[in-house]
Amino acid sequence: MNINTRHGGAYDRGSADSYYRRGRKPHYYVGATYQSEIITEERMTLEEIEAYHLGFDENDASGNFKEWE
């Protein structure tokens, strides 16, 4: 599997959801995060969904989470 780790991509969004301790909700942005079209799970390929979950799981395993003060 070829993982695209660009900002706003599926892997990046999975990692960010884990970092901020949000629930799993596969998605990605076509371009800039929050400033371009969002692609939700219903429109994602299996590879994109797997990339999202990989980003989420790898961040979870690293223990790298946002510390809210």
Image: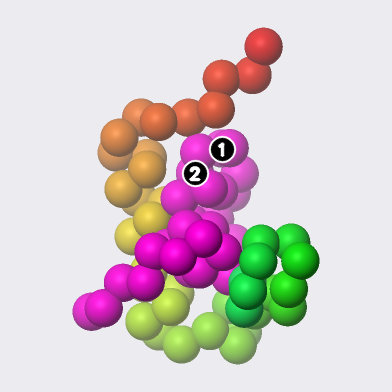
Q: Is residue 45 left or right of residue 36?
A: left
Measuring from the top left, give residue 46's x and y in whole percent: 40, 84
Measuring from the top left, give residue 35's x and y in whole percent: 76, 66
Give the residue furthest to the top: 69
Which one is nearer the viewer's eye here, 50 or 34? Answer: 34
Identified by mark 2, the residue type is Ser
Q: Is residue 24 left or right of residue 56?
A: right
- Quarter of the image for residue 33 reads bottom right
Q: Is residue 62 left or right of residue 29?
A: left
- The magenta-colored residue range is 1-28
Q: Which residue is mark 1?
A: 21
Q: Residues within 10 Å of mark 1 (few under 14, many from 20)?
A: few
Above or below, 18 relative to 1: above
**Residue under the image location 43 percent in, 78 percent down:** 48
Above or below, 4 relative to 43: above
State the SS at label 2. Answer: helix
State the SS at label 1. Answer: loop
Measuring from the top left, give residue 57's x and y in whole percent: 35, 50
